[in-house]
Image (cartoon, rainbow, N blue to C red):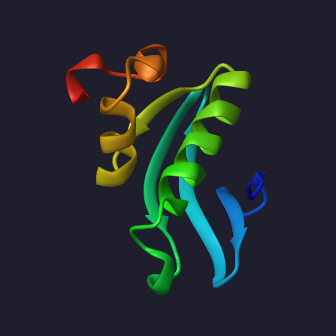
Amino acid sequence: MSVVRDNTDLNRFEMDTEAGLAIADYRLNGFTMTIYHTEVPARLRGRGHGGRLVMGALSQARSKSYKIVPSCWFVREVMSASSKYDDLWADRSSK
């Protein structure tokens, strides 16, 4: 399983895949993280890589006490699919 790393210089989470880099771009405002874009290499889409990337990003955000604004539809979908992310929502009405 690939490791998700936080590239703080570029404000994005990264995960190496056999087809290249998968990324989740974010902005920080205090302890609020807005994840606004995710991308997985085209030939790997639909194989679970995006979910692993987002779950790894959310795990790291939780460890730093960030609240999440999922402005990317995919991040919102992952967070909405499981109650284990309920504590991460910055604004419950966006759920």
Give the residue at x 43% y 73%. 45
What residue lies at 59% left-to-right and 65% top-to-bottom? 23
Residue 60 lies in quadrant:
top right
Pinpoint residue 55: horizontal percent, then vertical percent.
56, 41
Which image quadrant for residue 90?
A: top left
Residue 40 pos. (x, y %): 51, 72
How many numbered discs sit on the rendered protein?
0
**Quadrant of residue 7 within the rendered picture:** bottom right
Q: Nearer the viewer, residue 4 or 64?
A: 4
| Res 64 visible | no
- x 29%, y 52%: residue: 73
Q: Which of 26 and 2 is in front in this view?
A: 2
Residue drawn at (39%, 68%) of the image: 46
Residue situated in front as seen by the camera: 2 or 10 = 2
Q: Where is residue 17 in the image (x, y as percent from the top left)?
A: 68, 73
Which residue of the protein is positioned furthest toward the left in this rendering?
93
